[in-house]
Amino acid sequence: GGTSGAGFDPSIFSEFGDIFGDFFGFGDLFESSARRKSSAQRGSDLRYDLQIGFNDAACGLKTKIKVPRMEVCQHCTGSGSARGSSPLTCSTCQGHGQVRYQQGFISITRTCHHCQGSGHIIKNHCKDCRGEGRVESERVLEVKIPAGVNSGSRLRISGEGEAGGKGGPPGDLYVVLIVGEHEIFERQENDIYCSISIGFPQAALGATITVPTLDGTENLSIPEGTQSGSVFRIRGKGIPNINGRGRGDQYISVNIVTPKKLNREQRRLLEQLGQINPVENKPLEKRLFEKVKDIFG
């Protein structure tokens, strides 16, 4: 998990407050704008990579994940002290977390090296967390994945990252989705594409065929004289928009299957057809996606 970047520390003005205060007597003005920084630390953000199926990404699902992370120690409730004891006030800084050094007329404030700025010292450490206030744990979370997600989509779960140190707030959990491939469909944004094989008589005479969709099967009308590579569109049978507004379309490319073996009657009929309707040989062009752009804009 990543951690938040280091921010601007306004406590640096406390040093100027001491200097200018000795000269001009308004050190309190600087001190009020540069109060001691809290020792509480925000917990780290965590990343969890989750693999889901193509249909799960299209339709959405609820699933459970196990997230290893640092959690607040239940034995000491995060204090770091053994049960029955409590942290002691630091004798070096008197609980302020800072100490002041006087060098002539210059006064400089520094973070207390004895308590590291917390203002407290733990004498009797908790046995479970060894004074850290946090322990390693594994939490089971239920994750709701909306319909329409794709590989690389991120789901942010607030407050489910690692526990903060010294009473700080927890971080967040980011679930990064990895969507598997489908054996039939290929996805481009919210549209899906597939190829279907048909026989020569179906292409020449026309037919109604059954094609697979994400919702089951759908009847598709093949017009008379359909050529191999022709593309048909079924509206609203693609991937749902992740914002819940509408769905993409499904594009179907038909491929005419040539029989490998013919009996005498089949050969005779095809030879007659070839004499009646000779075909001019032309090179094929463009991939399926490019043809769809030309056909459907």
Image (cartoon, rainbow, N blue to C red):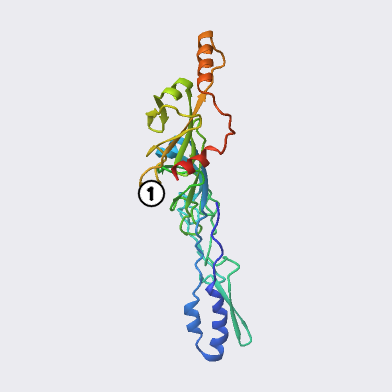
Up the image or down, 196 lies above or below 235; here it is above
**Percent coordinates x, y for residue 231 in the rendering:** 46, 35
Q: Position of residue 172 (x, y in %)?
A: 47, 53
Residue 51 higher or lower than 87, as above or below: above
Q: Which residue is mark 1?
A: 243
Front in this rendered view, residue 39 or 59: 59
User: Can see residue 72?
Assistant: no
User: Between residues 85 and 213, which one lies in front from this camera angle?
Assistant: 213
* The residue positioned farthest toward the top in the image shown: 264
Which residue is at 41% across, 33% downward? Answer: 214
Whether residue 272 is visible here, answered yes or no, is yes
| Disc 1, SS | loop
Q: Residues within 10 Å of mark 1 (few under 14, many from 20)?
A: few
Residue that sits furthest to the right in the current view: 103
Q: Position of residue 78 (x, y in %)?
A: 47, 55
Q: In the image, what residue type sits under mark 1?
A: Asn
Q: Residue at x 56, y 62 (%)?
A: 5
Left or right of 106 in this view: 293: left
